[in-house]
Image: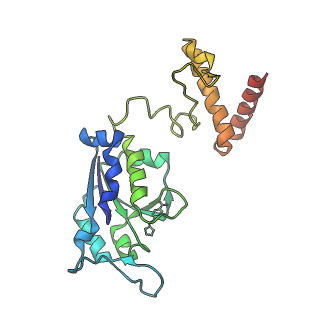
């Protein structure tokens, strides 16, 4: 899978060279190509932005500069995404769907934004990573690249995307995990996990996932699952 990132700050993408995404790049499972929008400036002082028509604060990225940066990477089946607080909010499902694409172009804005005409011309899809405003689209682009790449074959171990929060069968949050030591500051690992009884362990984990979701994010549950969680909590207290 190929990500072309159009940005004024390619150095900001350094974090993706590490850990799991870094390894995915080394294994050629994903390719992250950083394009500096400033390289497409039209003047000798490398300007890329100008004051907004109609007045107001800040600067606006010029359409011709952004368009030429886009043209340098555009492809037949590429989907172009503009990271923007105006966009549809990104979630686990969006990540999974976008991971099926071969080529994504991520456009990162700065200042007050990008001239609307080039957004219309390229027919970008606007995506937001949440309802807050950041100084640029780079962090949202990195968030998307990370979440999408996890679904690319070979990036994670086989079963790790199946069980996790938001993408497991029932849309439940993850059950609690434990490792050594068996006792930490007087707190013991739940007995069932060391019992060797895998049916019981599975059952316990499903119950814990439901209880955790009920306590932390009850709005994720429908009424019947909320009732089930309450019953489980009662049973456990007894
Ligand atoms: C995306 C971009 C937040 C998001 C951004 C988000 C840069 N802030 N919630 N800031 O995904 C005007 C031009 C603001 C680019 C944009």
* Position of 203 relative to 111 (above/below): above
- Image vertical order of residue 83 relative to residue 23, above or below: below
Q: 175 or 19: nearer the eye? A: 19
Q: Position of residue 79 (x, y in %)?
A: 34, 57
Q: Relative to 16, is 131 on the left or the right?
A: right
- On the image, the x and y values in percent for residue 114 come to 39, 73
Looking at this rendering, what residue extends furthest in the top direction? 196
Q: Residue furthest front?
A: 185
Q: How many marks?
A: 0
Residue 110 placed where, x, y %?
A: 40, 69
User: Residue 54 lies in what quarter of the image?
Assistant: bottom left
Question: Taking the image as drawn, is residue 221 in sight?
Answer: no
Q: Nearer the viewer, residue 204 or 179?
A: 179
- Residue at the spot x=48%, y=84% of the render? 56
Q: Position of residue 44 (x, y in %)?
A: 20, 80
Q: Which residue is at a point 74% across and 23% down the rendered structure image?
A: 236
For residue 73, above or below residue 207: below
Residue toward you, 90 or 14: 14
Q: Quadrant of the C terminus?
A: top right
Task: Give the vertical position of 35 relative to 93 (above or below).
Answer: below
For residue 73, which quarter of the picture? bottom left
Q: How is the image coloured?
A: rainbow
In the picture as drawn, the residue positioned furthest to the bottom comes out as 54
Q: Residue at x 54, y 11 (%)?
A: 196
Asked whether residue 216 appears in the rendered view, the answer is yes
Residue drawn at (27%, 40%) of the image: 29
Query: Would residue 42 be found to the left or right of residue 149 on screen?
Result: left
């Amino acid at each position: 899978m190929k990500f072309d990132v159009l940005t004024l700050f390619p150095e900001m993408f350094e974090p993706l060279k590490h850990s799991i995404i870094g390894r995915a790049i080394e294994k050629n499972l994903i390719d992250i190509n950083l394009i500096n929008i400033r390289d497409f400036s039209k003047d000798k002082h490398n300007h890329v932005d100008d004051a907004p028509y109609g007045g107001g604060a800040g600067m606006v990225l010029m359409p011709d500069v952004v368009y030429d940066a886009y043209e340098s990477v555009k492809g037949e089946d590429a989907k172009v995404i503009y990271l923007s607080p105006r966009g549809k909010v990104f979630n686990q499902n969006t990540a999974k769907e976008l991971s099926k694409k071969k080529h994504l172009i991520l456009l990162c804005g700065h200042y007050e934004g990008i001239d609307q005409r080039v957004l219309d011309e390229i027919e970008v899809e606007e995506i937001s990573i949440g309802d807050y405003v950041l100084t640029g689209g780079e962090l949202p682009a990195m968030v998307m690249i990370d979440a999408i790449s996890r679904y690319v074959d070979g990036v994670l171990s086989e079963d790790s995307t199946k069980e996790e929060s938001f993408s497991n069968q029932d849309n439940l949050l993850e059950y609690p995990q434990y490792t050594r030591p068996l006792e930490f500051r007087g707190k013991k690992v739940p007995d069932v996990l060391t019992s060797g009884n895998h049916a019981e362990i599975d059952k316990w984990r499903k119950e814990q996932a439901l209880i955790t979701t009920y306590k932390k994010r009850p709005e994720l549950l429908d009424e019947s699952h909320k009732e089930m969680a309450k019953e489980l909590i009662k049973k456990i207290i007894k």
